[in-house]
Amino acid sequence: MSYRFRDLVIERIGVVGSGNIGPDIALFFAKAFHGHGVPVVVVDVSADAVARGRAKAEAKIAKGRESGAFKPDAADAMLRALTFTTDYAQLAGASLVVEAATENLDVKRKIFAQLESLCGPDAILASNSSHIEPEEIFGGLGAGARKRALVIHYFFPAERNLLVEI
């Protein structure tokens, strides 16, 4: 399934980084798009980080179910929408990817080089960086990818805070 807004079609969303804020960003997307059947894939290089991120998201969904913030069907759909993995290939074809890795320029550039080759020519590539300039992060990308790249900084807790800095 997918979500369409004007000319933008979102069929898969990716989040790179399963540490502090990545699982929260993924949960935000799962909450917003589960009704449209849009999968959210969270990728990290560490199996331990993936397991911790999955546990964090599952605990927040369980708490929302218990408090009544999420109806049982919605909570189940959010859980089904979320995939946590170490396999970057699962980001292939993503319409939107938000990088939420460590604040290390070399790491971010490596991630975006991978994303440029994995995602389609219309995919939106975003970084959750809080202080590295976009020109530095996206400088190694081709011109086409740079035109669709942006920094989008989420505020904690990302799954509940509607305020984002773009």
Image (spheres, rainbow, N blue to C red):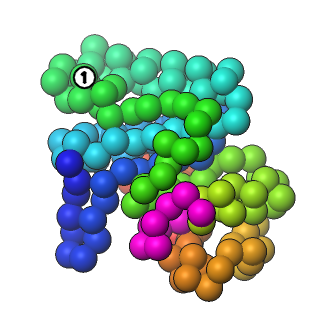
Please state if 88 lies on the left or on the right of 96 as rendered: right
Taking 37 as reference, is 17 left or right? right
Residue at 75% across / 57% down in the picture? 110
Displayed quadrant of residue 72: top left
**In the image, residue 135 lies at what x, y percent?**
72, 79
Residue at the outermost top position: 66
Front-lying residue, 70 or 97 = 97
The residue where tag 1 is placed is 76
| Numbered range of the magenta stretch | 117-125
Q: Secondary structure at mark 1?
A: helix
Residue 120 magenta-highlighted: yes
**In this view, 122 is above or below 16:** below
Q: Position of residue 6 (x, y in %)?
A: 20, 75
Disc 1 crowd rating (10 Å Cα; few below 14, some 14-19, many 20+) is some
Describe residue 51's horizontal placement relative to residue 84 as left or right.
right
Task: Pinpoint residue 51: horizontal percent, then vertical percent.
Answer: 59, 20
Residue drawn where x is 36% and y is 51% of the image: 12
Residue 130 visible within the image: no
Q: Is any part of residue 122 visible from this angle?
A: yes
Towards the viewer: 142 or 40? 142
Q: Magenta span has 14?
A: no
Name which residue lies at 39% across and 33% down. 82
Compared with 104, 71 (above or below) is above
Asked if residue 56 lies left or right of residue 105, the reply is: left
Q: How many marks?
A: 1
Q: What residue type is disc 1 on?
A: Asp
Q: Identify the residue shown where x is 36% and y is 18%.
A: 63
